[in-house]
Image: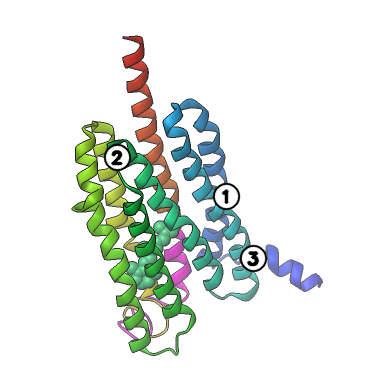
Amino acid sequence: MENLLLEIIQIKKDDPVAFTFFTGYMAMFAASIFFFFERGTVSGKWKTSLLISGLITGIAAVHYFYMRDYYTVTGENPTALRYIDWTLTVPLMCVEFYLILKPAGAKVGLLWKMIIASVWMLVAGYIGEAFTDGSMSHSVIWGVLSTVGYAYILYAAWFGEVKQLADQSQSPAVIKGIRALAWFVLVGWAIYPIGYMAMPGGWLGPDGAGLLTTSSMDLIYNIGDAVNKIGFGLVVYAIAKAETAKEQGLTTA
Ligand SMILES: *C/C=C(C)/C=C/C=C(C)/C=C/C1=C(C)CCCC1(C)C
């Protein structure tokens, strides 16, 4: 028992993955407090968006709390916890897109399409990682299937309905904000497939190009999460603040 406790609190000095689990946890936690408190400073119709930003980082914080210990004790990837976290938080990011675009006429159908695409992406990724037999064919097949879901969201954000609704909104803050979120989907989300390719049998891992070790998967995923959950929330926050200022300017004019 004594040994177990010692292991839980230990961060080995040559283990950057453990550092990012602890930093990630604290950063998500702090971001949630920030979004929840700032919710009071934006106008009524933006409060739900900030609530969702806080929920995304809050749900991640709880999972990081467990993943951190799982990792420090076992030294293994907390795959199940990771995917449970993503299956809750990525659909909530789709809700963010929907809420921002609702005044411009976004329909619930769009929200469902994005949620289904994101869950497809994550279920395929989970099968790829959790049920691996170490072969490249398993990793590649499920990775490609997962990418189909990712491609849909990417398309929607850059050229499809999301982009079109943003243009229709005629609000510079919404257009700029949706463009920033689309960049997150293009660049920030692309971090994850790189981590995935470090898995056993992955293209970039020890059985593939040999550029990444399997232990770097969590490092890459942790960086991706910090960028995408906190950064994404901050963009939503910036849109909400800009729109609130505009509304207040109009009512006093
Ligand atoms: C907060 C968590 C986020 C934004 C997670 C996003 C995850 C992805 C975009 C994952 C994508 C994957 C692929 C496109 C192919 C390989 C398997 C995945 C699941 C890593």
Task: State the CA–CA distance, disc 2 to disc 1.
Answer: 26 Å
Q: Amino acid at mark 2?
A: Gly
Residue at the spot 50% in from the left edge and 38% down from the top edge: 35
Quick check: 209 above or below 52? below
Q: Earlier in the sequence, mark 2 or mark 3?
A: 3
Query: Element type at marker 2?
Result: helix
Q: Quadrant of the C terminus?
A: top left
Q: Is residue 214 left or right of residue 181?
A: right
**Residue extent of the magenta highlight:** 205-223
Q: Is residue 222 magenta?
A: yes
Question: Residue 203: which quarter of the image?
Answer: bottom left
The kind of residue on which mark 3 rests is: Asp
Residue matched to label 1:
26
Can residue 105 be spotted in the picture?
yes
Residue in front for this viewpoint, 108 or 95: 108
Residue assigned mark 3: 69
